[in-house]
Amino acid sequence: MSKNIFGKLINIVMDIMIFIFGIILLISIYNAIQVKVLGNDYSSFFGYSIFEVQTGSMADYIEAGDWIVVKYSKNIELDDVVTFEQDGEFITHRVIEAYNGTFVTQGDANNSKDDPISQEQIVGKVVKILPAFGIFKKTIFNPAVLITLIITLYLIGLTFKKVDNTKKVDVIMANILKKLKIFIKNIIKLIKKKLNKPKEITKEVPQEVIKEIKEEPKDEVVVTKVNEEVEEPVVHLNQIKEEDFDKTMYFRMVQVDKDELVENKIEIPEEEVEEIVKEEKEPTLSVVETELEMINKKKKKFKNVIEKAIFIKEEEIKEIIDLLNDGEKLKTNEATIKENLLKVYIDGKYYNYCGDVNVEYNGRNMASRVIEAIKKAGEKLNKQYKGSDKQFNEKVKKYVDLFTLITYIEQANLVLDDLQVKKQTYKNKILKILSIPFSQKELDKIVNTIIKTQKKYKAMIKYILEKLETELFNLKYNQVNKNIYALELEHNVNFSKVYSDYIVDKTYNDGIIAEDKMIVLINLLSIQLIKDMFEAEFNKKYILYVPESLYEKDNKLDKVFKLLEDEYAKNNVIVLTQYDKLVKNKKVIKDLIKLGYKFAVDIENNEIKNKDISMIQLMTYIFVPKKRKGVLSSIDVLAAMPNENNIIYDDIASKVGSYWGE
């Protein structure tokens, strides 16, 4: 009697455990459907999602290996800990700034802020922390372990079932094996239904899958060429690996080290290697327009064309970095490291700013200066880092090397015209700096892809600059001295002889039309500024005249100066005004100088008054008519402008269109 009761208790316990583990298995299968079949990035159960924390960026509050329960919510406030998606990764950090649907986050253990995020990127706020639950992912929440547990419990339960004493042991075992066979068959059928791919393969098979298939016995799986119909292969339990299930779990996986990727690099047979990228062809107009649409989606509004051109250049560099990085997803802190070094690179390469502004050296010989700035920035990142990431220094070194390589590649692209010489230079630098054992075919493909990428982005920038050009106006660059050019906008329209030159000039150079011409002038100048930046011609200065009437129209004035709202433009474009106009509009001009814009003044026939000296000293240049060179007291001029090099004796008015008829 006691044995029967014990057996029943065991059966009840086994049934309960099988039920519990069965529910967990069903949840895992549901998650697989959400992620693999429906293509969602994560699973959600009635607005709740579970994530496993992989890093210590929130140390002391959330540790690596903890589980977090995230609840979907639109009501995000300061100090909330939120999970958000950025660049394909899920990050959990604390909200430290919030305004107008935009949020800035930072990990408790990090020493720098994250990039701003929008409400749409936020999965939800953390409502529960389950400490050290990461171990369950390798055990209970592992589908392979779950299946084994359920089978084991099922067999144990069977042994305690009441059986006929007349049955022999071999009959009992036969029944057990029969039920086990049926159970395994059902499990296989379920896995095939939920996890297998369709019969017709229409997309390129990933190399990891190709390798996996090739390693299976030939009598079990028939490998056919991509895009051909194949019969659905039989899936055996021993074929289902833990990493296959990981792709369908709730949890974001930690990427392996780059060294491991290199060590286990897949060697693709020659007949399966993709056709080498054709770098000879220039990108078509449709390709350029499509790429620009994608750029506009990433950043919907630009202050001016200079900002847009630099953003396109940043996207080009990021694409090449990803290519050289073998498409590896960013690990913890890598996004911050990458963005920091990208800014240092852009400042040095396109703004001539390597720790301090320097216009003394030739841009074509600037690689060493940029590389030095990148290395110093890397050292600074290592010194300032206070987090728990033990691989932080290695990650910094990796990106210092990548941006060093980018510096050499862009320099070679600028100075080398011969394609074969350029390609060989790229290869040499890649092998020397990255020290990765690429095969010759891999190296050829990488270099060809880099060249194709460079041509694509160059075509995009060319396209947006051509949109600014107009046949109605010409921009003249009247040389003042070696590196200073005064700008004069001339119309290119043929008028009937019934209109006198006086009437035409008056129409184009006065009032509203003169003000509107400023937009045209600056757009045409922007083309030249971008070319100077990309060709490293940093020492050119451009003088332009702004009509006085604009200083009285705040909105229109803001619109004009918005087109020059860029550090390079502010350093290299000088706005000219006349002495009496400077005195009259000194408040507006002083405010613009505080914003970083540079001004010059034409003294004309005026004598500098003591009360105006402080204002004159804010000018980058003083222009003095040539006829007054021996007449105007040098003492007066030097009192206002101590640096004699900034005093230029030139009839500047005639070189900017005689002040546009004013």
Image: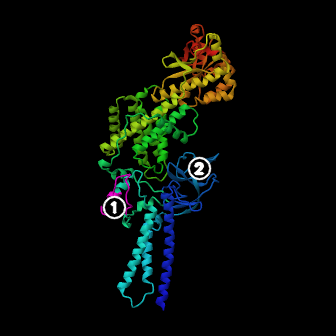
- At which x and y percent is residue 604? 62, 12
- At which x and y percent is residue 64? 49, 58
On whether residue 354 falls in the magenta region, the answer is no
Instruction: Tell me how many marks there are.
Output: 2
Question: Residue 71, relative to residue 411: is it above or below?
Answer: below
- For the residue labelled by badge 2, is the local secondary structure a helix, a strand or a loop? helix
Which of marks 2 and 1 precedes in the sequence? 2
Residues tagged 1 and 2 counted as in contact (Cβ below 8 A) = no
User: Which of the 4 image quarters holds residue 486?
Assistant: top right
**Residue corresponding to mark 1:** 221
What is the distance, in whole Å, between disc 1 and disc 2 at their CAs?
Answer: 43 Å
**Residue corresponding to mark 2:** 120
Q: Which residues are the magenta region? A: 212-233
Question: Residue 518, relative to residue 171: is it above or below?
Answer: above
Dominant secondary-structure state across the stretch colored magenta: loop
Of the two numbered discs 1 and 2 in the rendering, the one whose residue sits closer to the viewer: 1
Amino acid at the residue labelled 1: Val
